[in-house]
Amino acid sequence: MQPSHTLPLASATFDEPNLVSTAGLVPVMQLADRVGLADLANRHLSVPTDKGSHAGAKVTALVAGMIAGADCIDDMALLRHGAMRKLFDGCYAPSTLGSFLRSFTFGHVRQLDAVASRVLIGLNQRTPLLAGLDEWAIVDIDDSIIEVHGHAKQGAGFGYSGVRGLNSFIATLTTEHSAPVIIGQRLRKGAVGSPRGSKRLVADTLKTVSRMRSTGAVGKVLFRADSAFMGYPTISTALTAGAHVSVTVRLNADVKRAISAIDEGSWTPIKYPQAIWDDETGRWVSKAEVAEIGFTAFAAQRKSHHVPGRLVVRRIPDVNADKKKLAGQGTLFDVWRFHAFFTTVPDDELDTVAMDKLHRQHAVIENVHADLKNSALAHMPSGVFSANAAWLVLAVIAFNLTRAAGTLTGRPSLAKATTGTLRRTLINVPARIASSARKLALHLPQNWPWQHAWDSLYTAALGPPTATAS
């Protein structure tokens, strides 16, 4: 594509008061209004002084800016361009929103957490956001370092990644038919151990899951995590809440003894990347194999802490095995590399191969972290820790709202798309504002590739509200 030679461009001026660049905010913020985001913020937040006044309007303004692509406080100026103040009330200046965030304390952040969980419950009631939640629900937890620069950031430090930053700790909820949504979040200082605070986050998360499911739900909840969270406080919290667990374990002496006791004939090749199906043997020819053995977690602790279950092990040939043999190190753990996890899911519900495949899908939470960092969490905008903690919660609300909007388009690809894709196709759509009979009309680009998806979202968000169960 080249610039037109038939009608060459003569000038460009920013002088049109009836244009907006983010018309997709209209249905999305209408959806936020349907689930009561502003009312919930007004009811739960008690930020003091004039900086905390009109909390609902300021929270919705911050969330709208994040949905439109803002990743710092200054970017909130995009809420005040063109005809935005004709379409929306409460288009605050960035300085006002920054003062509001800096007035937060830890208690106010927890109040905002309550708002976020109730917004998610409302979205689940009004959209197909978590289809199949009553059948099988999976909760994942993981943390990630958000890089920051300078010494003025409260709480910034060098964590496990060796990068100066703050620690974003989130929990996601996924079903068989839905993409993950964020159901719990905490901001922690950068130099923090991964398990710190996990017991409380898991308890809060599973409590929210139980509130979202119907009373007749028959499916179990599965809690997944990596080896950093394989501790009795976290595991017992999940089990007490009625969930199964599937948690990666480190190769300590007890785990190695259990792996050594697995019979060689128990190993099963699995369908793995670049695996080949062998018609003669009727098996997948793969360098990865799985097996399992009965295992009791925390056996070295007191008897009340013992948790019986299964140790599922995946092994892959060590690429340096030949060199180790020549060096006289041809032991079991030199020939194979082992990856093991502990689970309480009964083997009559999921066999070894199916359980291994399900556990490996825990990596989906890494995509959520990447999505957040590609959006509002590209920066931690304030030097005040509590302001950044509130920013994280608002980013989570924006993420879940955008995800819910994607499920209302009628397109399965958009229902599981990233925030960047949804912003490009549904949110950042230019429009011209026209008024007639004291009402506004939006005129959007002709031949927009995602017109039907946008129309479906607009109809669902601005149409009559759907009936909800009492």
Image: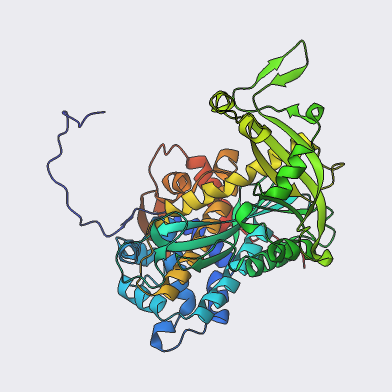
Q: Is residue 406 visible?
A: yes
310 or 35: nearer the viewer: 310
Name which residue lies at 79% across and 65% down: 240
Outermost residue toward the front in this view: 328
Is 79 on the left or on the right of 202, as rendered? left
Q: Position of residue 316 (x, y in %)?
A: 63, 31
Q: Quadrant of residue 166?
A: bottom left
Q: Is residue 273 above or below residue 159?
A: above
Q: Is residue 437 visible?
A: no
Outermost residue toward the right in this view: 348
Q: Position of residue 180 (x, y in %)?
A: 61, 50
**Quick one: quadrant of the N terminus?**
top left
Is 123 on the left or on the right of 390, as rendered? right
Q: Is residue 72 above or below residue 179?
A: below
Outermost residue toward the bottom in this view: 49
Name which residue lies at 24% across and 56% down: 16
Q: Position of residue 26 (x, y in %)?
A: 46, 58
Name which residue lies at 27% across and 60% down: 17
